[in-house]
Image (cartoon, helix red, strand yellow):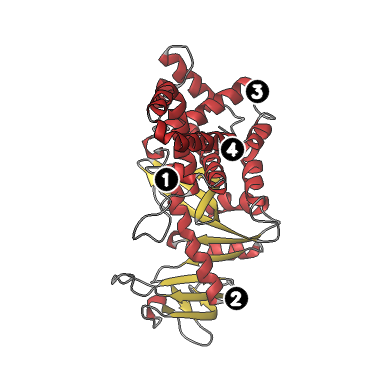
Amino acid sequence: MLPQFYQSHLQKYLSETQLITLKLLVWLLQNQKQVKIERLAAMLPLPIQQNSRRRHIQRFLHLRRLSVVILWFPLIKEIINRRIYQGKQLIIALDRTQWQENNILMASAIYQKRALPIFWILLPKKGASNLREQQTVLRPVIKLFKTHKVVIIGDREFHSVDLAQWIHRQGVKFVLRQKKDTIFRQKRQKFKSLSNVKIAPGQRQFLSEINITQKKGFGRFNLAVYWKRKYKGKPEKAPWYLLTNLSDLDTALIIYKKRFGIEAMFKDCKTGGYNLEGSKASPDKLIRIVLLIALAMTAAWLQGARTAVLGKSSYICRPKEIGRTKRRHSSFWIGLYGYSWIAAFHECQEWVEKLIASFRNKRAFYQRGLRAITLIQEAF
């Protein structure tokens, strides 16, 4: 189910039948964990022939009203504003994911080791994005969150000094990882590659006001260099070279480490959640399918967070595991599979009630479980 404030916003732009179709598709995404149109059509609970159901979905995905800016921007802004107040730091990760012929460039907000999708475009090519495409994604995101202290982070694909300079001109902070063969110069010294910076595992350095590359007309930025120490006997292959307009080393490192939340989000979109890589939709439909995933994903995440607050997540996952210090299941996972658990309960409720009646000595435990199901459902 979609949260009520989602529905209140969406009904302003979608007709009643369009909103019902959207809710059905999100329900199918949560239930089937699959975005293939053929699979969705096979399971869409409309009493019409399968081919008609498929055309119904395709017509819906052609709607111009399924706009990221119109439908999604107000919702993601509301979600983030409820958790990161205006004037506070907001970390935006720029990243790209590619599978087969599909190549998506996305900006996401990092929150609690997870990324929440904000804006995305489908690149008409394979491989890395260029400056114009990066600006296309970042410009509306910076405008949307102009009341926050935005920091843009990106991996080595986004090492361009042109991108750094453009972000700096927007009045925004950034931390962009550089390639080791990038050339730089400190004051009154010669140009050399970043790989010549003397550093060993477990060490860190901060170089102020360097020139990066030999292009003229660019201001000076700072460089944070960090090489992680060995972990469980395995050394990190290479140090991080982080170009930034932040003023200190620790802040730059802390912020960049949060980038890995977007890897978890891409996994949620693909094999770990909705199997986006299985979609064979056209580019236009794919953008709208990602919108459906964003609605479903954040709804599941909100549901999982609410389930944890209620103290009922143990009914969905193991709260503790021997030898594991970090929790295994995210709020997204708890919300997604919690929904499946409740759907299965209702589907098999008659059998479950007979089973409960057969174990009188366990009745108290079952009653607590039924109460948990009620509370979790109320949070939908």
Q: Residues within 10 Å of mark 3 (few under 14, many from 20)?
A: few
Q: Position of residue 184 (x, y in %)?
A: 47, 77
What amino acid type should be assigned to the residue bearing mark 1?
Cys
Question: Is label 3 or label 1 in front?
Answer: 1
Q: Please, what secondary structure does the residue beneath circle 2 have? A: loop
Quadrant of the rendered structure where residue 360 is? Answer: top left
Residue at image mark 4: 379
Measure the alpha-carbon separation of dots 4 and 2: 43 Å
- Say which label, 1 or 2, has the lower sequence index: 2
- Say which label, 4 or 2, has the lower sequence index: 2
- Say which label, 2 or 3, has the lower sequence index: 3
Q: Residues within 10 Å of mark 4 (few under 14, many from 20)?
A: some
Residue at image mark 1: 317
Measure the alpha-carbon separation of dots 4 and 1: 18 Å
The answer to whether mark 3 and mark 4 are in CB contact below 8 A is no
Residue at image mark 2: 247
Measure the alpha-carbon separation of dots 2 and 3: 50 Å
Residue at image mark 3: 15
The answer to whether mark 3 and mark 1 are in CB contact below 8 A is no
What amino acid type should be assigned to the residue bearing mark 2?
Ser
